[in-house]
Amino acid sequence: MADHAAHRDHPHGLAHQFEDMPQQKESAVIGMWSFLITEILFFGGFFATYLIYRSYYPYAFFEGSSHLDILLGGINTAVLIVSSLTMAMAVHESHSGNKKRIMVYLILTGILGLTFLVIKYFEYSSKVEHGLVPGLVWHPHGEYSPQLALFFSLYFGMTGMHALHMVVGIGLLTWVFVKTAQGTYTAEYNAPIEIFGLYWHFVDIVWIFLFPLLYLLGTQGGH
Amino acid sequence: MADHHHGPTVRIYLAVFAALMFFTVLTVWVAYRDLGPFNDVVALGIACTKATIVILFFMHVKYASRLTWLMAGAGVLFLLILFAFAMADYVSRGWLGIPVSHYLQ
Amino acid sequence: MAIVERDIRTSEDAPRVNYLNNGYGLKSWLLTKDHKRIAVLYIISISIFFALGGLFASLVRFELMTPEGDLMSSDTYNKVFSMHGIIMVFFFLVPSIPATIGNFLVPIMVGAKDLAFPRVNLLSWYVYVVAGILGTIAVVGGGVDTGWTFYTPYSSTYSNSNVILTAMAAFLAGFSSILTGLNFVVTIHTMRAPGMTWFRLPLFVWSHYATSLIMLLGTPVIAITLVLLMLERGFGFGFFDPNLGGDPVLFQHLFWFYSHPAVYIMILPSMGVMSEMVACVARKRVFGYEFVAFSSVAIAILGFLVWGHHMFVSSQSTYAGMVFSVITFLVAVPSAIKTFNWTATLYKGSIVFDTPMFYVYGYLGLFLVGGLTGLFLSSMGLDIHLHDTYFVVAHFHYIMVGGQVMGYLGGMHFWWPKITGKMYPDIWGRVSALLVFLGFNLTFFPQFILGYMGMPRRYHVYPDEFQVLNVASSLGASILALGYLIPGAYLTWSIFKGPKAPDNPWGAKGLEWETTSPPPTFNFDETPLVTEEAYQYGPIEEH
């Protein structure tokens, strides 16, 4: 097999099924994009549901939105944007294989991701206090639209699924970080950092849409 | 394809970051202005712009092969098919003038 | 990756190291990253589910032999047909050809050593196994009675059966199929051997590419739909609940956005199998190669625009229904292109009467009937009469069983020598193919008539005048069962006692026939260089 000769000068990190590093890297990037396509359509189910109910019950949605905290949502948007920058920088540094800088940027990204989750936790617990969790703790104060529960089901469904992706992202980040610390990645072999970056940015994009759709509706009081 | 890397520079990253922050502030600011139905249009327009810059620069699609463009495009296209065909049902339900659903008023 | 490659350049008489004898322990199978071994694991596991689904089908046919519901209660009957559907769709039909024959052949046909992500491939099998175990627990623990479609609000609010567990199983099975599709897309894009251009790819690869596109674009939507269903049923979240203003029909939209294209996940791979087999039995290049290739992609894309034809009698708007109806008719065009082109390939071909030929002919006949009756159902007016009758049941069984299972069995017979390195007795192959064809028609043709006369699906009691046709159908089902059991027997026999297969027993073209039977672990001794188009069969000799 042609591999026998190649085994002697086998490039670091090249899996057996590939001929060379560019082919491996291209496969990794296309594989991640294929996965992101599935993610787009996965969240798409939520967005389609949102679109349809929003168009049928605009007032219930304005009302639900006015219960959300724009300040916390806005801070979280900023936190994710900064984390996207640090992630992009980590990928940037990985091209030169600068282990120390990659690690710094990954840590920053991880801390920002955790910050997002902590803020999200405070938001969730305030909703629980106000009895705004459909099915589980549902006793909104005063008069409320009959379809308010639809809005909050979507709110918890969408942000919850997003938060789950953040948790998975932080888990993957830890793994990439450990591998970086072990010196696995070099200027030639860094595809895992790159495709993890794609995932992280994607999760950020989902939030870029969730923030206006969920938080910013209520400002107009349902005109 | 990816053997010699022509990724964005740090300057571009910082510019993209600044643009994203600017648009975030802008979208909150606009939300407090009463534009009637255009509030939604502007909010979604800004969100799409932000997403596009993230995809082009942070996710390197601007510098990537045509296949990557195709992949990102296919995801969005089929998402729009889902929206459009599902909405086609919901907007045209009342057109015949007979009640078709007990569920949606 | 610490795979130590054994030296395969041994002398002629010593047994060659191939993927099967390269390690024997259980661990060498359960931790394998070899796509061929994973394909074999898949063959074993989907056969188990095929048998289980078949068992439930037999129960349905037993019950329907008499007009009274004397074998089981209506509750039990609801569970039996639901579990037949769920197991057959999610655990057999969707992975049937892609995860087995496709997994085995796609890398070999493009001239690669393996799929792009061997570990993801193994993960996909494990996810499938976990899904299968969850599904089995749901079956053993009381079953599920929602039908395979899980329609709300019955599934989310009223059903007392194991809906969440089953939905979880279907969710995981979908995840496993996403991983398979992802691997195929990347492999076909990046791992083609030198000289293997897109238009030199075998049509099997084209049809698997189209299938993978549907897996990537459609499956996540069923995943999120099942998540919404589980949230609503489990926590009382409102998405489809009419009491909260939700619309149960929205569930149907989301469900069919995947589940209609999923029909093409179930039929496109068998179309690929047919293209390979037609070319081989006729000893000719597939007529209109480019058209057959593009029609696969066209079917995949058009398949996403027609889902509303399942909802003509829901509260879907009539206008939307009209659009869906018209586009549904369009799907017939690429399907017809394929059928015509296969027929044209056979024309003036040098037909070989081996087992694969029997499956090709059987498939062409059954797919034709299944496809044409689909046009009946896509006309809105006629569908009001035929909706939820046995006409629909017969139609989709002609496609799923007459199409996909014929393709699966035909493909297994065609590539069995390559997969196992053993030959099976060809006469038995022909006998069983005939039994499948006859049994199938006797089972499902009467159901067209029953449906047209107005017998609804999913009921276990029916008026006396339907009994003759129902008994005929049950009789056919037993012949069909025999037609499935016989290959199970002789194929198993051939593994142990069958004569050794030559590298190319059918005299077929294609990279998979140029390597040994069974292939070595990395498929080829040297990366192949492709210099000619697919199916370059020589001029036909006069016999």
Image: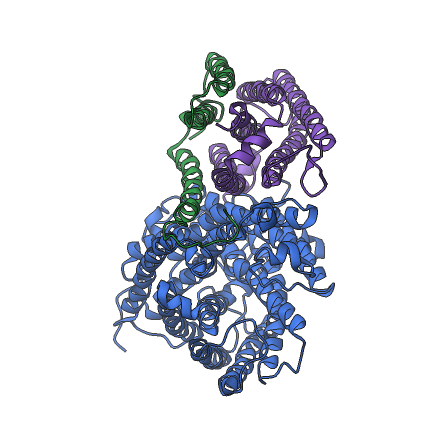
Q: Residue at x 38, y 77 (%)?
A: C353
Q: Is residue C166 left or right of residue A6?
A: right
Q: Nearer the viewer, residue A75 or C32?
A: A75
Q: Nearer the viewer, residue C414 or C373?
A: C373
Spot occupied by residue C540 in the image (x, y as percentages of width and height): 27, 69
Colour of chain A, in one word, is purple
The answer to which quarter of the image holds residue A16 is top right
Spot occupied by residue A130 in the image (x, y as percentages of width and height): 71, 31
Q: Tell me if residue B62 comes above or below residue C116 in the rendering.
A: above
> Who's blue, chain-wise?
C
Q: Tell me if residue C479 comes above or below residue C251 in the rendering.
A: below
Colour of chain B, in one word, is green
Q: Is residue C128 left or right of residue B42?
A: right
The answer to which quarter of the image holds residue C384 is bottom left
Q: Residue at x 54, y 69 (%)?
A: C422
Spot occupied by residue B45 in the image (x, y as percentages of width and height): 42, 26
Q: Is residue C495 left or right of residue C101?
A: right
Q: Nearer the viewer, residue C472 or A149?
A: A149
Which color mode does the image show? by chain
Residue A129 in view (yes/no): yes
Quarter of the image with the C terminus of chain C is: bottom left
Q: Nearer the viewer, residue A27 or C27?
A: A27
Quarter of the image with the N terminus of chain C is: top right
Q: Tell me if residue C442 comes above or below residue B1 in the rendering.
A: below
Task: Give the residue at the far top of this rendering.
Answer: B11
